[in-house]
Every structure is written in C-alpha cells, then in structure tokens.
Image (spheres, rainbow, N blue to C red):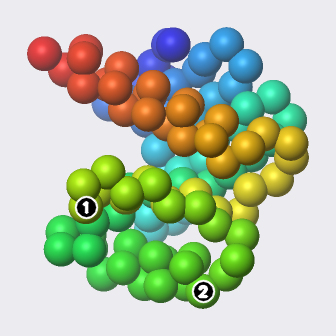
C-alpha cells in the first residue's frame, strides 16, 4: 500500500494492488471512495456521539436507502453506500480496514 499525499503532505488516500482509496471526494469532506478493479463504493466513518452534523445528516440519508452496508466496531461504524460493480461489501470493508490499520501503524 502506498499513501497518497496532498500539496501539504497530508495523507488523503492510498493506492493498493488492485485499486485506490480516497478519504474525501465531496465538497463537504463527508465521504470517500474506494475502487477495487472496476467496482466502486462510497464510504465514511460514523460515530453517533462524535460525528459532525453533515455526517449525521448523510448517515440518516444513507440508512434510508437499501443499497448500503454498515460494519459497527464498538460504536465506530464504517458506512458503505452506492456500491457499483462485482466487488462485495466484504471486499470493500477489508480494503478500508487495511487502509486504516496501515495508517495507524505508520503514525507511531
């Protein structure tokens, strides 16, 4: 996995063997995008007690649609939505977890 940096040397995503992950792709910095081969899925992290209003609003909108998946890790949720292509939600979750783990490992 190779991190993608912006002009201020801040991590904004990563490339990996068969795709990419971006932290934010919208103007409000609320959700990102994962691409695995020809499949894509939007994603964000959600915590009902700590997420900002924009993310709370997006969360309510996403859960009202059937095309979403949520993995709850002790209150911190990875929310996936608007999936396209053949990759499964599990494929996307695995890639996001690898990205988050890689980032945590390299912070210290």
Quarter of the rendering containing residue 61: bottom right
Number of numbered callouts drawn? 2
Q: Residue at x 45, y 19 (%)?
A: 3
Can the viewer see residue 1? yes
Q: Is residue 42 above or below residue 56?
A: above
On the image, the x and y values in percent for residue 77 come to 37, 58
Which is nearer the eye, 31 or 71? 71
Residue 7 x, y percent position in the rendering: 40, 29
Q: Is residue 28 above or below residue 7?
A: below
Classify residue 50 as left or right of residue 39: left
Q: Foreground residue, 65 or 51? A: 65
Q: Using the image, determine if residue 63 lies above or below residue 15.
A: below
Specify whether residue 7 is in view: no
At x 67% / y 81%, what residue is drawn? 65
Mark 2 to mark 1 CA distance (whole Å): 19 Å
Residue 64, numbered label: 2
Report the side of 84 relative to 50 (left or right). right
**Looking at the image, which residue sits at the far left?**
108
Quadrant housing residue 8: top left
Q: Residue at x 30, y 81 (%)?
A: 53
Callout 1 environment at 10 Å: few (<14), some (14 to 19), or many (20+)?
A: few
Q: Which mark is residue 75?
A: 1
Left/right placement of residue 29 relative to residue 88 reads: left
Q: Does dot 1 land on a helix, a strand or a loop?
A: loop
């Amino acid at each position: 996995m190779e991190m993608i940096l912006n002009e201020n040397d801040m991590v904004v995503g990563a490339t990996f063997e068969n795709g990419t992950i971006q932290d934010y792709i919208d103007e409000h910095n609320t959700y990102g995008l994962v691409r695995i081969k020809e499949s894509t899925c939007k994603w964000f992290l959600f915590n009902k007690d700590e997420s900002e209003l924009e993310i709370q609003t997006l969360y309510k909108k996403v859960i009202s649609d059937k095309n979403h998946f949520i993995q709850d890790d002790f209150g911190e949720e990875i929310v996936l939505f608007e999936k396209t292509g053949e990759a499964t939600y599990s494929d996307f979750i695995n890639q996001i977890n690898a990205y988050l783990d890689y980032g945590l490992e390299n912070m210290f």
